[in-house]
Image: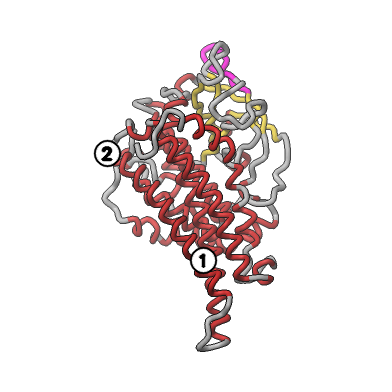
Amino acid sequence: MTPKPKAIATSDLLADPAFQDALTLAAQHADDVDRNSRFPSEAVEALRTAGALSWLVPEEFGGAGAPFEDVAEGVFELSRRCAATGMVFAMHQIQVACIVRHASRSAWFAEYLRRLSREQRLIASATSEVGTGGDVRRSIAALEPDGDSLRLEKKATTISYGAHADDLLTTIRRGPESEAGDQVLVLTHLSETTMQQTDQWDTLGMRGTCSPGFEVRAICRPDQVLPVPFATISAETMVPFSHILWAHVWLGLSTDAFDRAQNFVRGQARKSPGTTPPSALRLSELSALMAQFRATVKFALDEYSESLEKGDRAVISTIGYAVRINNLKIVASEAAVEACQGALKVCGVVGYKNGGPFSIGRALRDAYSAALMIANDRLYATNASLLLVHREGK
């Protein structure tokens, strides 16, 4: 079910008035979403109206059949207005991609994609688990036979927007006798799933993603299990989609911070015509950082998009690619914090204050979450092992 790139300009989807409404609503409600740690319902409903939740679904199943670049650009634009909304959109698209690219010829998943497109269903993900130390490539919970059905019970440390989704894609061991790394992905509807919240989501940043822990219980049919092992799905789709789309979230919020800093410096310049404000030097330094940040993200997007267009799964399964995509996540997550801190130095106290056109606080707090989403230390450790058998440049 790999989506074929559609002959459509990126600007066509982004210029859709319904999607533009979503951008407007994301910006209007961003501060309230952050302040009250609430789900960005207004923007997400506008995304449903725009049909954006099925952008990645092939046309034969009622979706837009859009190329990956369109989705990445949509994530970036949403995140410039509200990083939490951009992250919700990104996480949903990651789950859609896993289904589209790995459902093979499953009749059940084909019908699900039609339903997703028709109803604009929002998919959440339960990949984390209590007791695994944050390692999403190991599971404790296992699928249990229950007559002709399957039963699952899992204690997830976080499920972003879990209380607001329509469906849930869960990683779990294939069966009671399976090893911790022998995992599958299971799609269940929230209507057939019991979710008991186990803690509260009161965090420094990314407050609108609403990501508390849950105990999940569900009964499902065997054909609700994706036929491809999660190890393959993770390497070919979930990891690259996650790191690239997350990087667009962080680039988006950093771009907003830079724009605010630039507007602040321009305002200072207008007050003293013919002179360059002292803060312009720091803005120039920040501009160089942003150029590097954009180039890094663009390279990763172009490389992976090319592999999608060619249908070349071999390249993205190499050790070299694994190192590069891990490096993208590390570099982008660290660059986001550095960029927001730089913007705060430019704006000074007006950037430190909440509210107002030059406030950097929300962007900086959201940026600090980046290093924690698959901890950078874990990725450094993974790359350290990979580099023992891999030579850079290959």
In the picture, the quarter occupied by the N terminus is: top left
Q: Is residue 26 visible?
A: no
Q: Earlier in the sequence, mark 2 or mark 1?
A: 1
Image coordinates of residue 156 in percent, x first then y, are 64, 31
Chain part drawn in magenta:
142-153
- Is residue 42 toward the left or the right of residue 213 in the image? left
Residue on which the image places disc 1: 285
Residue on which the image places disc 2: 310
- Is residue 138 toward the left or the right of residue 69 in the image? right
Image coordinates of residue 386 in percent, x first then y, are 46, 30
Frontmost residue, 196 versus 175: 175
The amino acid on which the numbered mark 2 sits, given as a three-letter code, is Lys
Q: Residue furthest bottom?
A: 273
* 383 in the magenta segment: no
Tag 2, which secondary structure?
helix
66 w.r.t. 321: above or below: below
Image coordinates of residue 311 in percent, x first then y, are 29, 35
The residue that appears at 64% across and 61% down in the rendered structure is: 31
Tag 1, which secondary structure?
helix
**Magenta portion: prevailing SS class:** strand
Snapshot quadrant of residue 57: top left
The amino acid on which the numbered mark 1 sits, given as a three-letter code, is Glu
239 w.r.t. 331: above or below: above
The residue that appears at 69% across and 65% down in the rendered structure is: 354
Frontmost residue, 171 versus 186: 171
Structural crowding at the residue carrying mark 2, measured as other residues with C-alpha within 10 Å and reported as few (<14), some (14–19) or many (≥20): few
